[in-house]
Amino acid sequence: MKHTSKWKQWTGAALLGAAALASGTVAAQNIKIGAINPYSGPLALYGTEVTRGYELAVDRINASGGLLGRRVELVRGDASNPQQGIATVEQLAVKDKVDMYMGTYISGISLTASDAAMRYNKLYWETNAVAVNLTERGLPNFIRSGPDGNAFAVTSVNVIRNLIAPNLKKDIKGLKVWIEHEDSIYGTGIAQVQRKLLTDAGAQVVGVGAHPARTIDLNDSVLRAKQAAPDVVVQTGYVPDGNLLLRTIREQGFKPGAILMVGTGDTPETLEAIGAGYLEGILVIGYPRHDITETFGPGQGAYLAAYRAKYKADPIAPQGMAAYSGAMIMAEAVKAAGSLDPEKVRAAAAALDKPESTYPSGFGAKFDKNMQNTRAWFTASQWQGGKMVTVFPQNAALPGVGVKPLARP
């Protein structure tokens, strides 16, 4: 009931804010934000989910009077590959006259789109793409409010050490791990850090496999992994290749002690493709879900209520709440800057100092010299009874929740 009340207050504020803005109280033109995501092709569902997070953030921002005294408007820019990201940024800049950009579900698109945005001296605020080199470029218009690939790697190794090894009645020292990943900058960067951290922890990395995200055959990869006889298979990728990997593991009768999916494996699409029986016990590293505690993610209940009210459904994937949290951090930085100028927003963002568990996804806000948020982390969930249940870290898991057996049926 508390969350319903918050939603009613938010809705009422939104109506008042919209009325004020529409009445001409704000004479300036809308601030247009180009939302760069795949809205067509195999990843359109998830690009749309990220943008739904932006839409809910914009609703709340406009309910509070907008940004810099102006109403905020989202303009969708469809990009399903890196080259299309460049063309879409150019179209939004020239034709739609957007003031800044936010994105995106795919790291490769963020790489090219943010570079294109720089040519127009426009801010590119990244909420979801995680490739480490996106911030390491030092691009002056680029800021990332969400976690990066290193956070994926750190979280996955922590889960292997603290959840998987004890469940298998083994120590991480000597634990045999197979690393599989899609071969773009996203999967490759995470796999490299995973391998180093696992080796440093004493685990034995028995093999590394790489595949294109759009691959249609993973038999060779799974056969090589099976021959290596790992205790744990760790996969980093997207939904299509993640689902294919799980189907191929099942079809080959490969039964590692545990399967850990990184960045994928937690969606209704995976449940439909693989089935609850086989998914039971599989662990997934991903963005914090809406079943986290309110202590860990304050406002997550109100976000869920707003999502259900606007879209008449539950969230498809947790990326949306991370996008929402990132957009709210962006709004704070822009307000503090008093401008959309990338240099001024960058300086304002650098001055933010919000502790972890400030935003619904459990994020805080503290940016390093490359404008990477160092207080944004992933969580681990597990398939239990056909549902994803948050199990790590402990303060994010609901009371009474524990880890179920990890073995394949």
Image (spheres, rainbow, N blue to C red):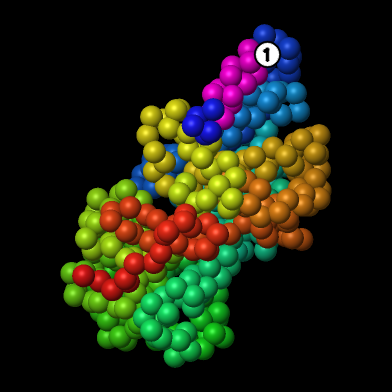
Q: Is residue 12 above or below residue 147?
A: above
Q: Say left or right for 239 vs 71.
A: left
Q: Which residue is mark 1?
A: 20
Toward the viewer: 48 or 220?
A: 48
Q: Say left or right for 354 vs 301.
A: right
The image shows residue 177 at horizontal and vertical percentages of 40, 81
Q: Tell me, yes or no, whether the highlighted magenta stretch contains residue 187.
A: no
Residue drawn at the location 48% of the way across and 89% of the way down: 173
Residue type at numbered disc 1: Ala
The image shows residue 317 at horizontal and vertical percentages of 42, 47
Toward the viewer: 373 or 300?
A: 300
Toward the viewer: 220 or 245?
A: 245
Q: How many marks?
A: 1
In terms of secondary structure, what is the magenta stretch mainly? helix
Residue 395 visible from this viewpoint: yes
Q: Tell me, yes or no, whether the highlighted magenta stretch contains residue 17.
A: yes
Q: Is residue 344 above or below residue 273?
A: above
Q: Which residues are magenta?
A: 6-20
The image shows residue 214 at horizontal and vertical percentages of 34, 58
